[in-house]
Amino acid sequence: MKKILVSAVLFFTVTAGYCSVAPVTELIDTPAHSILDYGGYEMQFRMFAGGGVLSKLNFGIFKSLNLGVGWEISNLIGVGNVVVAPPSLQLKFNIYAGDAKWPGFSIGYDGQGYFYDETSAEFMQKGKGVYAVIGKELFLPDLNFNAGVNVNDFKESRLIGFVNSSVIVIDDTLMFMIECDNIGKGDMTRLNSGLKLWITESFNIDFAMRNLTSSDETRYGCERIFRINYQGKF
């Protein structure tokens, strides 16, 4: 056990000192303005309540454009019938990368929701739909803020807001994340928070809590999730 602990400490020390981490394109449920580089790709595997797994695969197909797909499978682990949601499209276009004076700006579409219901053939928690997001580093180095609006119900055409922030706690190793989603939808507004840990330059894992202000299990209040992320380049 002592050898394992010493090895782990040495590993993370080396990683912190020599790893240059990959860009963060989204926090927990909300996007950042940044995108994958041209020729880059990202794979995500998110484990959520009820033994479900949400997989995402995104590509930097052009310098300013990312294209991807998401696929949710509920009850994959545990008991009960496995529920397979239809694949969802993700598209993100970076209009302006940002500079020392002006924030970055992106627009996109994300059809990936959460907790697919076979009876209604809809996600119980809708995806972003069409969205716009701006983001910038403010006040302190590695303290980033993003804010945006989205429309995910085209029958109502109602604007919904989201904000998020992240800060590097340990250089190239640990990041703290917090976000507020579904702003303007009353008790459906969600406060989420979590940690991102980089194991290598390309590989990181997230531990997060969703809907922190609710204990209502029927609305998946205070849900714990675990996500594995890997970024590479062709």
Image: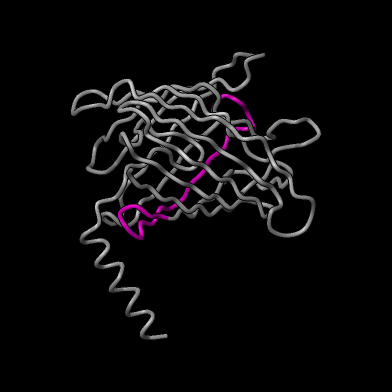
Answer left or right for 29 relative to 133. Answer: right
x and y percentages locating residue 99 in the rendered image: 20, 27
Query: Is residue 86 highlighted in magenta?
Result: no
Judge whether 14 appears above or below 144 on screen.
Answer: below
Outermost residue, bottom side: 2
Judge whether 97 appears above or below 82 on screen.
Answer: above
Answer left or right for 102 relative to 83. Answer: left
Colouring scheme applied when the structure was drawn: one colour
The span picked out in magenta is: 183-204
x and y percentages locating residue 5 in the rendered image: 37, 79
Quadrant of res 159: top right
Quarter of the image that includes the C terminus:
top left
x and y percentages locating residue 75 in the rendered image: 71, 52
Query: Is residue 192 highlighted in magenta?
Result: yes
Q: Nearer the viewer, residue 33 or 194?
A: 33
Judge whether 90 appears above or below 23 on screen.
Answer: above
The residue under the point 77% across, 36% down is: 118
The residue under the point 35% across, 33% down is: 35
Answer left or right for 73 relative to 38. Answer: right
The residue under the point 69% across, 35% down is: 124
Quarter of the image that includes the N terminus:
bottom left
x and y percentages locating residue 173 in the rendered image: 31, 57
